Image: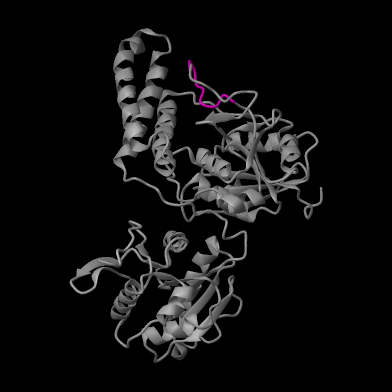
Amino acid sequence: MIDGVIDVSVIIPARDPDPEHLTQQLAALAAQEDPPAFEVVGVDNGSRRPLREQGPDRVGSAPVRVVEAPYAAGINVARVAGVRAARADLMVCCDSDDVVAPRWLAAAHRELVTGDVLVGGPVRGFREVIGDSGPAHPADSLAEVAGRPFASGCNVGFTRGVIERTGGFDESWPADGSAEDLDFSWRCAEAGLEARFAPEMVVEYRLRTDLRGVFRQRRFYGRGDICFSDRHGWPRGRSGCRRRVLGQLKGIVWFLPRAVTEPRGSWHLARRVGLVVGHLEGLLRPVDRRPVRGVSLDLRDPTATVVLGPVRSRHDLESAMAVLAHRYPRVEVVAIVDATAGASSWSGGRPLPIRTVDGGGRTVAESRNRAVATVDRDLIVFLDPDAVDLAALDRHLDVLERFEVSAGRSASWVTTRRSGRRLVPDTGALGIRRSAFQELGGFAGDADGTAVARAFGDGAGAAGFRVADLTSMEREQTDA
């Protein structure tokens, strides 16, 4: 196999994987029958022992690359990093502790070459433990939830076009809950994408063999159920989940005598209790309806510009650029720098496109207006260089898809007799559409940043623009 010719990228997310299990999975990939030209992309999601030290450089004739995603925990974070690093437009995901069948890759490739589809196959032993009587994934079709097909995240294939049309895996999904793959499958269905079943695309799922592992797994499922209900309103939102939990609690009380007498009673009880505990934990959390922020912006021409400033040192700019490069490798950056600090040449050799604007001796309003004058992209986000928060940047871009102005987490709502209810933006973290910025005439005033932000927020409200903060996504009521 020639490394430059890659038909399929195999993405394996991992966080502290069992070395023996990882070795078995890589051996199974090396033994694939009639495989296409493929690569293995291992994603290290913050392992204590670096993944680079645990795997070979090649699996059979296929190259192995390891990319790191230590900035946030979560299997979707790792999958997104893997998708971004993949060389091929056809991708399949599997887990580090399972074992793929000999024709797994060939079966997935056969379906993916036909177009933008989601493909899955049999998952033997999924949700099965000793004595389990619950349903497993069917052997002749994809499982369904509310009539929609569902491909398990440990055995799923897709094209780059699928990622672009759906936004990809949702990085905001809680790391301590499951159903992230169900969310991805549902969004594929909503986008009108076909989900296919490949009978030979088999994954042997590693079963839990101890009561503690069974309890933790079902607790994991329970928390994911609630998050899925928040995002998609099924079944009947949280009210339906609460009724379901009440039924489960009654079932546990009814089952307790049998848990003592039946041979596998303790296993059944661990599953039931774990699921209820997970559901209760999920219901105690605030409702989470955050929109998807995956890799779609990374896979097409970016429309966002990040304005950093004021930048007072080379170290601040270097740190900010390193953080941004993790998530948005092609986002445009404009840095407002102090010319007296000798920063005029900082744009050279940076990992992202960057321009510098001289901010020395100018007010906050003047320097920001000067920076925006160099921008021709649709979305503009202002950030402090010493506090770049990727999650906040993601959120700004989410808000700007529906609102004209996004205010940072430190924004506050105020009510005045004259102006009514207004959102006072945080001068250090603010997002706006370029058309709205131009209509408002930019920033005004020669006072400090807080006063400039307040004046800007008042102007946006008076102009009838839709303004939202990152925390509540609450829409401003501009008219009394």
| Quadrant placement of the C terminus | bottom left
Residue 422 image point, x, y percent: 27, 69
Q: Residue furthest left?
A: 417
> Which corner quadrant of the image does residue 202 belong to?
top right
Can residue 268 be spotted in the picture? yes
Residue 263 image point, x, y percent: 42, 9
Residue at the spot 43% in from the left edge and 44% down from the top edge:
231
Residue at the spot 74% in from the left edge and 46% down from the top edge:
38
Q: Main secondary structure of the magenta part?
A: loop
Q: Is residue 269 above or below residue 17?
A: above
Classify residue 392 as left or right of residue 10: left
| Magenta span | 124-132
> Which corner quadrant of the image does residue 271 belong to?
top left
Can residue 309 be spotted in the picture? no
Residue at the spot 55% in from the left edge and 63% down from the top edge:
328
Classify residue 112 as left or right of residue 316: right
Q: Is residue 53 above or below residue 397?
A: above
283, 233: nearer the viewer: 233
